[in-house]
Image (tube, rainbow, N blue to C red):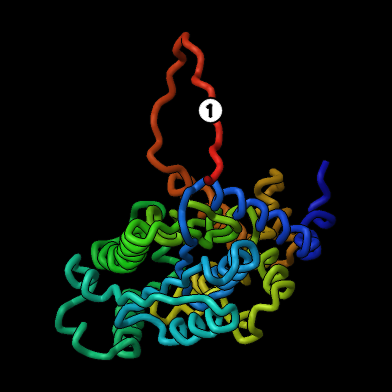
Amino acid sequence: MINPNELLRKDIFGIDASEIARKIEEFIATEFLVSNRNKIVVPISGGLDSSVVVALCVRDVGPDKVVGLMLPELFGNPEANRYGIMIAKSLGIETKKINITPAAIGLGGFDPFFSLISGRKYLEKIIARHMAKRSHSAGRDYMAWLQGDLDKPGRKVVFKVNSKQRIRLLITYKYADKNNCLVAGSSHQTEVMVGLFCKYGIDDCADIMPLKNLYRSHIVQLADYLEIPPKIRKRTPNPDIVPGVTDKYRGYFGLTSELVELIIVGYLNNIAPKQIATALNIDDDKVEAVILAIELSEPMRNHSRAPGFDFYWSKPSKPKKTSRV
């Protein structure tokens, strides 16, 4: 039987960062080789995750074959642009900036009147007033959305947030198709397991996801090993698309990312919620909220599910990989 106190320790996420980086670089090299693409494009936000991905790509294929794609919007966090330029300069890569605001307005993701105002702070006040009036919080509304109980005004906010991420994905692949690029994304286990991503958005879809089987604690160690600029390493896990939310784990669960991922580990090892709470010295209801998010977000992690059939013929063999000429 697993002892929760022995398993649920922060040091379980300790890794040999150099070895993990080597394995990821081998993965990137193989995928780039068989993709028959000229370059790798990485959507960068100046956050920790995308900075680590773009750094690993550069180490593998060189700065001349990597493009950092910046996709700002009117009400986005201006720091994303500053930090995105910072990581690009530190790695010596080409950048391309495409503003998604016109596309978001066309899709209805922005009010045309408010889009004329340079108003992230104004939007933050509007959202804060809206939440206070309804006695809601980001965490409460997130759980209500997962359970299908979110009210109409709340669903409208979800659409506005998700539409930006899906627009970013569309624009990324437009750029990739036109320039013969492989798309590298920055998703990872900690956010995926609790549903803190947009299904079919830029934080969910890519040709390769080098960090998808790692937790955020692993990525922090990789960032240190790769010597990502300290200012980027110190950034909180900020979604940059929800004004007022500067740390998505604290904002939605009232917990640090480290505690959230330890709850995930406990859940995956069939440890009872109360035992997890005791081992981590946190309230039962916080553990139960994270576990509920894991279970309710499961459909988000499975794309285009379909029924299975047991036909008598055998499955075709996988095609052989081809090498570049």
Q: Is residue 162 visible?
A: no
Q: Relative to residue 250, is residue 185 depicted above or below? A: above
Q: Relative to residue 164, is residue 101 depicted above or below? A: below
Residue marked by disc 1: 318
- Residue 292, image x and y in percent? 52, 52
Q: Is residue 160 left or right of residue 76?
A: left
Looking at this view, name the residue that lies furthest to the left. Answer: 113
Looking at this view, name the residue that lies furthest to the front. Answer: 325
Q: SS at mark 1?
A: loop
Q: Quadrant of residue 253?
A: bottom right
Amino acid type, label 1: Lys
What residue is shown at x 55% (from left), y 36% (from top)?
321
Q: Is residue 31 visible?
A: yes
What residue is shown at x 83% (from left), y 50% (from top)?
3
| Of 20 and 265, the residue lying toward us | 20
For the N terminus, the quadrant is top right
Looking at this view, name the residue that lies furthest to the top. Answer: 312
| Of 40 and 225, the residue lying toward us | 40
